[in-house]
Image: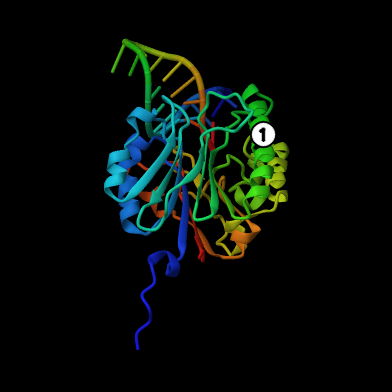
Amino acid sequence: MTAAVLPESARTPLRLATWNVNSLKIRLPHLLAWLNSRTLDIVCLQETKLTDESFPAQALTDVGYQCHFAGQKTYNGVAILLREARIGNAGAVVTALPDWKDEQKRLIALTVEGMRVVCAYFPNGQSVGSDKYRYKLQWIEALTQWLRSELAANEQLALLGDFNIAPEARDVHDPALWEGQVLCSEPEREGFRALLALGLGDAFRLFEQPERSFTWWDYRDLAFRRKMGLRIDHILLSSALAKVCTACEIDVELRRRERPSDHAPVVATLNHR
DNA sequence: ATGGCATGACAATCATGA
């Protein structure tokens, strides 16, 4: 007696990933090798730093991914890649926060497999009290308001991206050094907690994790080797998705490569029907 | 002490990142 052959979508877990590539042009070989080395179904990218005309869609289509992207010259730029063998057509694609006039390409969202997937590149904020810091807090507020209505309409929602926020002291290699600094300041952390208060869970913290788990290390001062990093890239899941999340890990290996991004990817596994 | 390194635009430095 043999088990019925089910379509792939019914038997394999779903893998969602987020990675700030810090220039997709430079990191395309790394990305292609990564996609080839493991099965990733939904891949959110930030800081592509490419206009839509120069997005390497063909190279990604060739390895089986459907591409959705919103880019600009030099800065920012986000994308969602969908593995065509696993994921059906995407719907309800948006490439900006509604009611937020912004030239900066920081958000793309779409619906697949009954799941709302939001890929976000939060502003960096530069320094506490700067114009960019104020813009960051306003942007987070606008995102939070929008997500409130998205969650009301979508029980299954995942927010992935570079949040540029280290939520807690344990997410910082030297909490005393970073105390009150941008990425760690209390208003930013309040913004992060407000996202959780919408009913989202930090996928990484659903599980036991090694101490000093980070997703970003400065290029300078051998910060990676010295484990001097921050955990600022996150996957937040609505409760319906958190319930079926079986793992969440940082793929540190990519930070060891030649000419790496300064960020490592985060990958979550879901037992999603 | 405001730099260290990386990227992109641009053509010697400068803006930005985190």
Q: In which chain is the residue bearing label 1?
A: A
User: Which residue ends up furthest to the bottom in the rendered image?
Assistant: A1
Question: How are the colours assigned in the image?
Answer: rainbow
Q: Amino acid at mark 1?
A: Ala
Q: Nearer the viewer, residue A131 or A109?
A: A109
Q: Residue at x 37, y 59 (%)?
A: A39
Q: Is residue A49 above or below residue B15?
A: below
Q: Residue at x 67, y 40 (%)?
A: A144
Q: Residue at x 39, y 58 (%)?
A: A86
| Whether residue A167 is visible | no
Horizontal relation, residue A124 to residue B3: left or right: right
Q: Nearer the viewer, residue A180 or A161?
A: A161
Mark 1 crowd level (few <14, some 14–19, many ≥20, 10 Å Cα):
some
Horizontal relation, residue B9 to residue A172: left or right: left
Horizontal relation, residue A33 to residue B4: left or right: left
Q: x and y percent of residue A196 in the render?
A: 69, 50
Q: Residue at x 36, y 53 (%)?
A: A84
